[in-house]
Amino acid sequence: MSSTFKIAVALLVLCTSVASAVQNIKVQGADFVNTVTLNRFQIIGVAYQPGGSSGFNPGSGVDPLSNGTTCLRDAALMQQLGINTIRIYNLDPAINHDLCASIFNAVGIYMLLDVNSPLPGQSLNRGDPGSTYNSQYLTQIFGIVEAFKDYPNTLGFFAGNEVINDDPSGGVVPPYLRAVTRDLKNYIAKHSIRSIPVGYSAADVNDILADTWEYLQCAINGSTSDMSRSDFFGLNSYSWCGTATYDSSGYNKIISQFSNTTIPVFFSEYGCNLVFPRIFSEVPILYGPQMTSVMSGGLVYEYSQEVSNYGLVVLYNNGTAQLRGDYDNLQAQYNTVNVTLLESQNTTAIELMPPTCKSSLITASGFYNKFDIPSIPAGGQQLIDNGISNPNNGKLVTVSQSTVSAMVYSSKGGLIQNLAIKPLPEDQSNTPNGTDTSGSASTSSSGTASPTATKKGAGRKNNVGVLELVVAVALPVLICT
């Protein structure tokens, strides 16, 4: 057999593994469920917004999923950490995300995506939502759908994040959130080959939390086909700090509050940083029998160290990175999780029917309790019927490089050797695997980039390059689609 033929066969195998991708996840009752295996899917994840606000600069073609070199490094570290999901907050629908999405797909990591951005006109104004609910806004959020709907590892879209965060916003925002959810789901139904869940990420504010959940999870007229109903409900909760317990953290109250949920509920952010080091002692409880009957996991805030001091990893402008003790502690806690138990399906949960929307579901006097959802704004239905102009449709591409070229250091200062992604077979999602990344590091005396270089986000961002999309070999170019 010629060497050229062997190379061609190897490339075909690579294409096949990338194209087959992870299996889609659907919502079934109060659970996320793998559409092929029918196993329950529990979110084991982190928030991913490297560079913070400076990591999102659409005018310069930069967002968290725009640089393949960065994504390769981070995906390798996330795979060893043991996560299966990332949440990305700010994205530009015009940027090419193919390589980053394909890298995360290859290692079995799903993406939960916020459709809004901090730019003017690209989110709802919580003080006057009607003023920003227009066709320009819909074009933005539909653009995010177009950019990510064809990636099999797109788990879902957040229609909003903490838009309702106090009593005044609770009095005006709720019907607009249901309108945005309806519009997103109608657009997906018209333009995507598969259903993709749409939900909400809520602030942990006692006065409005229960009413927000009740308002979004009920079905108008009791119809299970109500497109304005949220498919899932995320909660940004930081109530477990240090050595708290199930009771002292208030987790017992959270389980009691959501015990009759008919949609998946999970922590869309968690990981209090009021006590250091963060030991993440809540992880075994979150993924244990006290909570998994109700909760569908959670996302630790956050992957990269920013000014808010929640990071698991410090990223530097020269492309190097260093793990923090938080990474080691979280990895150790993940390694205690019984994945087989997590994947066991709850027959009762998947058969639950939503409550019928009615004003009596709402308890706070100032919270909006009518279900007169706003009509789609002028021009919006045309966008749904015909699609947005010149959509940027993402697709999986060949991931031709697995080894991380950047220098990555353990929390103890040693250089981590042979860091690479390990593409998963059989369409698997990533799970905690007992890896101890801190123990796999060794110091190196060779000349390397220093981990004490300017921290990413603290200075001007350097161009660290982009991975090649295909392998250069002496035979016809092979393209995987």
Image (spheres, rainbow, N blue to C red):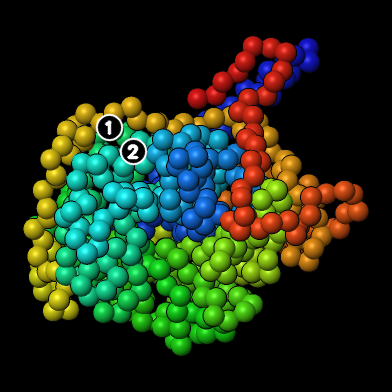
Quarter holding the N terminus? top right
Question: Which residue corresponds to the image point at 66% horizontal and 50% vertical from the top-left?
Answer: 317
- Disc 1 designates what residue? 388
Which percent across, then down, holds residue 370? 9, 65
Q: Name the amino acid type tagged 1.
A: Ile
Give the side of residue 244 with respect to residue 33, left or right.
Answer: right
Give the side of residue 1 with respect to residue 222, left or right.
Answer: right
- Quick one: label 1 or label 2, which is nearer the N terminus? 2
Question: Which residue corresponds to the image point at 60% horizontal and 75% vertical from the top-left?
Answer: 278
Mark yes or no: residue 336 visible: no
Q: For the residue labelled by badge 1, is the local secondary structure a helix, a strand or a loop? A: loop
User: Looking at the rendered structure, which numbered label has been put on residue 143?
Assistant: 2
Q: Name the amino acid type tagged 2.
A: Gly
Res 377 quadrant in image: top left
Q: Are marks 1 and 2 in contact (CB under 8 Å)?
A: yes
Pick the residue in front: 478 or 468: 468
- Note whether 250 is above or below 161 in the view shown: below
Q: For the residue labelled by badge 2, is the local secondary structure a helix, a strand or a loop? A: helix
Res 166 quadrant in image: bottom left
Pick the residue in front: 470 or 344: 470
Question: Which residue corresponds to the image point at 34% horizontal and 60% vertical from the top-left?
Answer: 161
Q: How many marks?
A: 2
